[in-house]
Amino acid sequence: MTNPTYTVLIVDDLQTHRELFGHFLLTDSSCDYRILEAESVRAGIELHRISTGEAAPTSKIDAILLDYSLPDGDGLDFLTKLHAQSNGNSPPVVMVTGRGDENIAAQAIKLGAQDYIATFDLTPARLQSAVASAIENARLRLQVQQSNDLLRVSLDMMLDRFGIYSAIRDTAGQIIDFRFEYLNAAALESNQMTAADMDRGLCEMFPAQCETGLFEKYCQVVTTGVPLILDDSIYTDVFGTQLLTRSYDTRISKLNDGFVAAWRDVTVQKQAEHERDRFFDLSIDLLATGNFAGYFTRLNPAFERVLGFTSAELMAQPFSYFVHPDDLEHTISAANGLSLGTMAVDFENRYRCQDGSYRWLSWTATPSIESKSWYAVARDITDSKRVEAELEQIAAALRASEWKFSAIFNQTFERIGLLSLNGIVLEINRSALDSFAHLGYAQYSEIIGKEFWETPWWKHSPQLQAQLKTAIFEAANGQFINYQFQFPAPSGGQIVLDFSLKPVFNEIGRVVTIVAEGHDITDLKQIQAALEQRNQDLDSFVHIVSHDLKAPLRAIANLSQWIEEDLEGEILTEIQPQLVLLRSRVARMSATIDGLLDYARIGRSNDKIEPVCVAQLLAETIDSLAPPPTFSISIAPNLPTLNTKRLFLSQVFANLIGNVIKHHDRSDGSIQISCQECGGFYEFEIADDGPGIAPENHDKVFAIFQAVNPQNSPDSTGIGLAIVKKIIETEGGTIRLESELGHGTTFYFTWKR
């Protein structure tokens, strides 16, 4: 018989001691020992760490012989560090020391040492016995711990609820409640209990246990020892904070002065059975069960609705009694197949109705060999059968139309092709073939089946080929791809294509093919270039006209100011207001010209897109408008930060808020500014309590040079709201207003997120 082999670590600063202890162990005829040595706390702890590592060159240490006095600490220090390093799972330690101190021995045992031996009592047999006992005790403790862990894990992993309860008795010995001794995880979750609740009594925790008589039944189990079985018991009580009604299957047996209980919550099962019955009764399909003897055993109300017979009438005869004579043979064959375990799927036959007519039924049936029965669902397909002939006619019409589609596909001027998900050309139209006929690839057969990036459109540019491969991969994953590229034209130069890859999805949302489409935008690009040049020319013209118009205006204003200054005190009273009016008209004309410049620039500027904190932007805008101190402007919290054109959004807010301040009929007016998410946009709301706008003027306010009340605002240019509307629509948003005379005005506009 082979002796067991153990690895022992001897931690002692004296070489002679280590050799002596090793010699004692190696002379043990019942065990084989492998000796490791360390002369300090640090060295011993390091050896233990290495032995527990996954890549340890040495085997696991089974026991440690430990001296109390070491150069860098004592044995108690070693035990403390060993425990910390092992997380409480350290090998057994036998302390061997020349100091026979009971206090040290007690501390060592407390810190995890298995034994304490004084060297003056040490003999080979004593040391061998102590080490062997320590190893064996550690093994047994590990087995017990593993068994306990396995039992607890098994109980906690149980889906059924499990609990152990002990009786709480009064001074007379009567059971007055039961104490929770243990509940598995499923029971704690079901009861909605925490660990703190375990200190409460069963009836204290769940009063309905007493009210329903269950407590008395538990007492009888403890008193008589007779197990208790409860099936489908309905129980209502407060679980956590909820009053719930549940259905349980319960098993209870006596355990010491208490009981052990296992219970299963069958509430969902009972509800499912109820729902199943409701589904069975309410289904518009015909649901049935039957036996291998050829009779229905249960039918839902749909049978009576479709066939006119009652369930009792249908179950009183073999089901073959109602089958059309022409369908009887294959119906009996299908029934025989069910008895042999073969399903019937989409089986069709005709059943007689009470009025003598027949209805087509499509059956799916599955057998249960154990119970010699079957379950079936049938659907009335009489109308479908009637429609089949019509569908065949439609199919013929569709086939006739395929050639029309093919003609359209090949006659369209757009370049269109179909690709597989890995980029193979499946189909291509005539326009696409003709677009590179000059390159020598005009034959349909030479393109179909090729990798798309290897066709002549792309071969002139490895960069375009790589871009296409990436685009096809993204389209195959459901993304719509669109970009522009150039390829050589037949007459020289370049053709510019607007190219797209559109994934085609099936009915379950999976990409099945890719449509490649190219649109020749060469002429459009040339027109755009010409248009951009025209816009530049127009900008130059506008600036020149602005300068030529505003220069004489400034001269008129300056001249009137000089006249007033030179003739100060000599101007007739009725002339001075005319000079002031003259300058105000000049200022209004200058503002009109500035407004026209702003209006003309909208949509043609290249303002950069940047993060814009709306709250900060509003604060800056309001500060620049300098409203009267008595004017109240309220801004909602949590306004968003947008990636947008800062100047455009600032112009919108400045015009809308400035209009309220300018046209308000009171100096103590108020404005409320708020925002809410609206799909891919934010909708901003600017509401005031001003004089309001008549409904017939709601559209008029956004027209250029249209002021609703010019007599009240002689300096109004009528351009501000036109600029606002054009900016918002250029940026993809909308603007509207709600207002009535005397009830204020609210402007709503949307801005892309």
Image (spheres, rainbow, N blue to C red):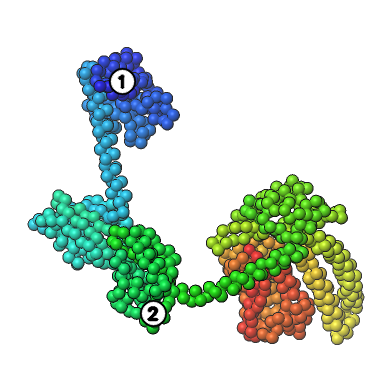
**Residue situated in front as seen by the camera: 296 or 204:** 296
* Alpha carbon separation for disc pair 1 and 2: 92 Å
**Residue situated in front as seen by the camera: 48 or 66:** 48
Q: Is residue 505 left or right of residue 363?
A: right
Which residue extends farthest top?
Answer: 16
**Residue situated in front as seen by the camera: 233 or 703:** 233
Three-letter code, disc 1: Tyr
Neighbour tally class for label 2: few under 14, some 14-19, many 20 plus, Cα within 10 Å: some
| Residue 81: x %, y % from top left | 36, 31
Q: Residue at x 27, y 22 (%)?
A: 2
Neighbour tally class for label 1: few under 14, some 14-19, many 20 plus, Cα within 10 Å: some
| Residue 652: x %, y % from top left | 70, 69
Q: Is tag 1's residue or tag 2's residue first in the polypeptide sequence?
A: 1
Q: Quadrant of the C terminus?
A: bottom right
Q: Secondary structure at mark 2?
A: loop
| Residue 700: x %, y % from top left | 73, 81
Q: Residue at x 76, y 83 (%)?
A: 710
Three-letter code, disc 2: Cys
**Residue situated in front as seen by the camera: 150 or 15:** 150
- Which circle marks residue 353 in the picture? 2
- Which circle marks residue 296 in the picture? none
Task: Tell me: residue 163, above or below residue 84.
Answer: below
- Please indicate, yes or no, whether residue 81 appears anywhere in the rendered image: yes
Q: Which residue is mark 1?
A: 33
Q: Residue at x 63, y 72 (%)?
A: 397
